[in-house]
Amino acid sequence: MSNETATLPVEAKARSGAFGEFWHYFSMNHGAVLGLIVFVLLVLVAIFAPLIAPHLPNEQYRDALLTPPMWHEGGKSTFILGTDAVGRDMLSRLIYGARYSLFIGLVVVVFSLTSGIILGVLAGYFRGWVDTLIMRVMDIILAFPSLLLALVLVAILGPGLFNAMLAIAVVLQPHFARLTRAAVMAEKNREYVISAKVAGAGHLRLMAVTILPNCLAPLIVQATLSFSNAILEAAALGFLGMGAQPPTPEWGTMLAAAREFILRAPWVVTYPGLAILITVLAINLIGDGLRDAFDPKLKRS
Amino acid sequence: MTQTVLQAKNLVRDYHVGGGLLTKARTVHAVKGVSFSVEKGKTLAIVGESGCGKSTLARIITLIDPATSGDLLIDGNKVDIAHSALTPEMRRKVQIVFQNPYGSLNPRQKIGDVLGEPLKINTDIPAAERRDRAMAMLKKVGLAPEHYNRYPHMFSGGQRQRIAIARALMLNPSLLVLDEPVSALDLSVQAQVLNLLADLQDEFQLTYVFISHDLSVVRYIADDVMVMYFGEAVEYGSRDAVFSDPKHSYTRTLFAATPRADVESIKARLAKKKAA
């Protein structure tokens, strides 16, 4: 390893760029690469859903209610994973559902991550009354049961997928703020931060360029966990009639709607659950790989 | 040439320790009225035990923390960061090298960026020239151009301290505060870094404020010596005067506590042992 880098000319190394280096370290983690492949496939499935899906997600085949998957007794080859209680093709609904679940996860994580980082950095960097104000508000949000708070917010904003996402983002955001604040407080008094200050760096540069990149590792892990959390909470809200509204082929809503058929028709529950499991697992593996690649201490010199 | 770079008059720094539920608020006097001046190209060593106010003084001189009272003049200009914002020109004049070479470099910044950052913040120099200057500085402190794209964790303690010195010199400061720069390094590396510092001082006409508790190092590098004891400067004078004729009892105790490794003292010790 070290011999190889030593013989490489300096110029060539500089040109290969930051991404090449990142990819080099990321690809060393095979689980992360597998997770990324699965995730990319999921994204492709979500994008090209109308081309891949054998049926429309909301088309009801009244003569084929609760048809089992094709390899079961009584299964039909037109409904590969069977149909649900009103005769809609499971596979098509799952394919279209990938769109909703990924979208929910992404939007919620982006919302809560950005607001959490901004608040956490401000609190950790300035301390004093800014810190007290921000963190007490976060404590209040955390003091409510998360689903209850999300419900209240949706009740105020009105039911619907977007409002549900907003509510979940507000509920998940204090975790990011707390993590960021703790990390910023630990880094703030390190000597390299003081060195940057002595070099003339202003508050904004110290916060965003010097301190924040050193606080990202726990945030990446938390973001991946929140991605799955967001999907699950969106499903819970959908089940209570406050999130994605019933005909929407969202995985969580499908899961919730199929609960009563769990004994008669296990596939109606199994496949949406499996879809969530695979998505969450893939994203968690990616998160692990990202953490390894971003943390220079884990890199081999 | 006797141009005074740094002059401190009666510097005081108090820390107010806030009272809790059961403790009263109190004031800690970290630095109690210290005055000194350093001329261009000279080295002032500040010596003292742990907690005597050396590092507090270093932070005041480096313009990180304000002094509670007293005047600080750098190149003849009075600086007061408690009441007025620091101009970039003043900021560039004083730089610091910290004791711990493992904490003073941003683990996520490549060496090239570490060295380029001060220029990027303070000047309009284009990226290509920043790169050239950083490369030149790397060579000057005894590192190689291929170190430009490496991360701090790939270096040894001595190399990191060289990088920290290089970063401090990027802005051509007139005053460099060295806060125990070699005490975390092993002896052979200490000698290398001290020699590097001496060479750089000659080359750039740098002024050093060298903070240390190691008297052998001080004897090697200092022109003037100030001994601090509980926030007060108990002894201040030229190196030879302080070492040959210490006035204050604390200074004498300090010198007596230093293990002596010269040939005469070893011979004397052996003779004493034989006699006993």
Image (cartoon, rainbow, N blue to C red):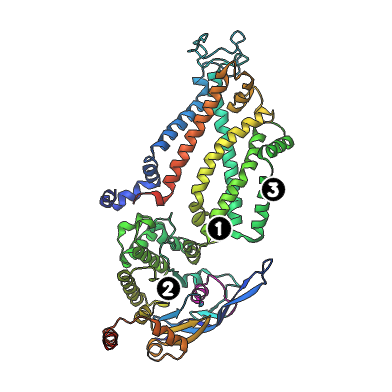
| Residue A70 relative to residue A11: left or right | right
Residue B223 location, x and y as percent?
A: 38, 84
Residue ranking furthest to the right? A156
From the image, tell me which residue sits under label 3: A140
Would you name the residue on which mark 1 appears? A185
User: Is B216 above or below relative to B125?
Assistant: below
Query: The residue tagged with tag 1: helix, strand or loop?
Result: helix
Residue marked by disc 2: B178
On the image, the x and y values in percent for residue A57 come to 58, 19
Magenta highlight on residue A88: no
Question: Which of the pair B219/A194 is nearer the observer?
Answer: B219
Residue numbers of the magenta segment: B53-69
Q: Quadrant of the N terminus of chain B?
A: bottom left
Q: Quadrant of residue A161?
A: top right
Please provide percent x and percent y for residue B69: 60, 79
Q: Determine the CA span between mark 1 and mark 2.
A: 26 Å
